[in-house]
């Protein structure tokens, strides 16, 4: 994933140095470039030194860092493998090596490296080990969704950030070669620009933006992604800041003119067949923080975006603004601690039914950015649900768009793609069940409704592969309590009405107690749910049940992480999924 997507990114302009580089050693030249975040250029120099016999481990760490920052993970992994064999290696190298191993699905090796690094943070270790375990389980489970590479839209460069452009097109951003000779020294690639992709003809063309009278937009640096309103006549575009090098302050650390490029939003208006910049977002503040990657609610009343502005809960949070009666946007409000964590939240999208999709690095999953979904609005959301494999992978998965939760597009830098980041299409492939009435779950005041795997306003029984209901248990208990019985009774009615349906019941525990103890407890919970259904006339041959101990947590409440009883309750559950 391109680092400029994050809140504060290090794309830098540099004035001419007072001392010619010819007078510097190779190491000094490389360090100077590295300090300017020009990783692609500094890597070439570090390699000359690090590939020598008995190379200093610090040089090797710089090489691995450069590869990691330009998203060449296989090469980074090879260098980290060499680095950790050196007793002088930094402890942090074990963490980055673990991240690369997880991405490459070498789970047991990744766990070993996480254990070496997290010796003083049991909670963080538990979350990382949970990522490995979840990836192992989820990749073995069947899914009702198929994810395929949108080959015609992608190149060997980075292509991502799709948004709907009417019914027959999408708009996305790409750093593909344009022939203008302009290069981002950080990655060695071009600058991100916007493109239109016709879903019918499979043709791609550059999207031209007219700067109008905008002081923010000159089109020289990163442009995109772009979020359109429902009418398709107004858009919010994310830009990296543009400042002339002569106006940059001298950085005391390096003695160079450096500038950290932050993100900002501008408004574009459709005039005929042209997009013209017609204003800047009132809450841009590029001297202090970033604002970007926006999404609009269908009615246009709420603008959601990611920012590291003061008052957030983590590195980047989701925020929203509400439209005033005069058309202006009210002050930003944080979307709250249900969706935001101490890590990074980004790339919000709201579908036609008001369901939120976004990417997070701070919730349990498979590693990297993962796509979650929640129901609600503004700062009032249900607990986020991980969309699991194959929507998510062990790589970065983000920027999902969909009309109804049944199909759409997402971005990912998973292995075997066309290039760095690619656009992928996902679709429901097992949708042959007649729609009737959805099941809901309300364990007291804990949660308002069960969130399907990919929720929408589908009125009726969710198709095969959906999580159609959730029942909950008391601490250290497996009996079916009244609220769970009410939920199972609904399931009984559905199964009797449709004799061809079968269900899978997956039971879980919260993180407290050992894995083996919780495995036995989760299995008792699964058996209790099956026994209830059998008692009410459902053949046992129509059910598959299994306990999964304390894996597949729905929130951050892993071992040794302080959580409320309400949060722990969400993990003591049986998920009910329809299968054919």
Image (cartoon, rainbow, N blue to C red):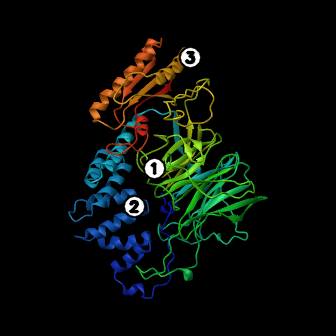
Crowding at mark 3 (Cα within 10 Å: few <14, some 14-19, many 20+) = few
**From the viewer's perspective, is residue 531 above or below residue 231?**
above
Residue that appears at 41% across and 47% down: 394
Rendered image quadrant of residue 343: bottom left
Mark 3: which secondary structure? loop
| C-alpha gap between disc 3 and disc 2 | 52 Å
Q: Position of residue 443 (x, y in %)?
A: 48, 30
Q: Earlier in the sequence, mark 3 or mark 2?
A: 2
- Left or right: where does residue 331 sit relative to residue 146? right
Question: Is there a contact, CB below 8 Å, between mark 1 and mark 2?
Answer: no
Tag nearer the camera, 3 or 1: 3
Q: Are there few (<14), some (14-19), or many (20+) residues within 10 Å of tag 2?
A: some
Residue 460 location, x and y as percent?
61, 26
Q: Residue furthest right?
A: 272
Q: Secondary structure at mark 2?
A: helix
Q: Which residue is mark 3?
A: 498
Disc 1 target residue: 414
Q: Residue at x 50, y 45 (%)?
A: 338
Relative vertical location of residue 290 with respect to residue 474 in this rendering, above or below: below
Count residues near mark 1 (Cα–Cα under 10 Å), then give few for <14, some for 14-19, many for 20+.
many
Q: Earlier in the sequence, mark 3 or mark 1?
A: 1
Q: Is residue 175 visible?
A: no
Residue 68: mark: 2
Q: Quadrant of residue 326?
A: bottom right
């Amino acid at each position: 994933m391109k680092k400029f997507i994050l809140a504060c990114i290090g794309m830098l302009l540099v004035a001419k140095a007072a001392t010619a580089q010819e007078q510097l050693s190779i190491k000094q030249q490389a360090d100077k470039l590295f300090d300017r975040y020009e990783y692609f250029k500094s890597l070439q120099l570090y390699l000359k030194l690090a590939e020598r016999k008995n190379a200093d481990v610090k040089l090797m760490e710089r090489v691995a860092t450069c590869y990691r920052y330009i998203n060449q993970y296989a090469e980074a992994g090879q260098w980290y493998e060499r680095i950790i064999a050196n007793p002088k290696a930094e402890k942090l190298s074990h963490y980055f090596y673990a991240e690369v191993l997880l991405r490459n699905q070498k789970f047991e090796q990744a766990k070993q490296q996480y254990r070496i690094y997290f010796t003083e943070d049991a909670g963080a270790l538990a979350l990382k080990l949970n990522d490995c375990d979840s990836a192992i389980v989820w990749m073995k489970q069947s899914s009702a969704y198929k994810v395929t590479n949108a080959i015609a839209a992608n190149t060997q460069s980075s292509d991502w950030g799709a948004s709907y452009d009417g019914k027959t097109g999408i708009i996305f951003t790409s750093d593909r070669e344009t022939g203008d000779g302009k290069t981002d020294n950080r990655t060695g690639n071009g600058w991100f620009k916007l493109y239109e992709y016709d879903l019918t003809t499979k043709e791609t063309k550059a999207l031209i933006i007219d700067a109008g009278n905008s002081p923010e937009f000159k089109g020289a640096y990163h442009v995109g992604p772009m979020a359109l309103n429902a009418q398709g006549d107004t858009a919010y575009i994310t830009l990296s800041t543009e400042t002339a090098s002569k106006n940059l302050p001298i950085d005391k650390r390096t003695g160079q003119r450096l500038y950290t490029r932050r993100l900002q939003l501008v408004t574009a208006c459709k005039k005929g067949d042209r997009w013209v910049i017609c204003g800047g977002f009132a809450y841009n503040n590029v001297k202090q923080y970033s604002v970007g990657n926006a999404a609009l609610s269908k009615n246009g009343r709420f603008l959601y975006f990611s920012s590291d502005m003061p008052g957030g809960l983590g590195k980047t949070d989701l925020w929203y603004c509400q439209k005033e009666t005069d058309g202006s946007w009210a002050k930003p409000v944080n979307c709250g601690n249900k969706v935001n964590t101490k890590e990074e939240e980004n790339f919000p999208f709201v579908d036609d039914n008001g369901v939120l999709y976004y990417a997070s690095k701070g919730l349990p999953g498979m590693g990297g950015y993962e796509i979650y979904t929640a129901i609600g609005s503004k700062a009032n959301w249900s607990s986020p649900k991980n969309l699991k494999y194959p929507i998510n992978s062990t790589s970065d998965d983000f920027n999902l768009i969909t009309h109804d939760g049944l199909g759409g597009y997402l971005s990912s830098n998973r292995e075997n793609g066309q290039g760095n980041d690619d656009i992928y299409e996902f679709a429901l492939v097992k949708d042959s069940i007649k729609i009737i009435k959805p099941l809901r779950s309300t364990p007291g005041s804990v949660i308002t409704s069960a969130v399907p795997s990919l929720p929408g306003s589908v009125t009726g029984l969710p198709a095969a592969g959906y999580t159609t209901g959730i029942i909950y248990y008391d601490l250290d208990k497996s009996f079916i309590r009244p609220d769970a019985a009410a939920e199972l009774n609904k399931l009984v009615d559905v199964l009797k009405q449709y004799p061809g349906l079968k269900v899978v019941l997956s039971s879980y525990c919260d993180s407290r107690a050992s894995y083996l103890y919780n495995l036995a407890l989760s299995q008792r919970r699964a058996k209790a749910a099956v026994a209830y259904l059998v008692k009410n006339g459902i053949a046992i041959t129509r059910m598959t049940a299994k306990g999964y101990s304390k894996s597949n947590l729905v929130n951050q409440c892993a071992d040794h992480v302080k959580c409320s009883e309400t949060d722990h309750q969400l993990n003591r559950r049986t998920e009910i999924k329809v299968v054919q």
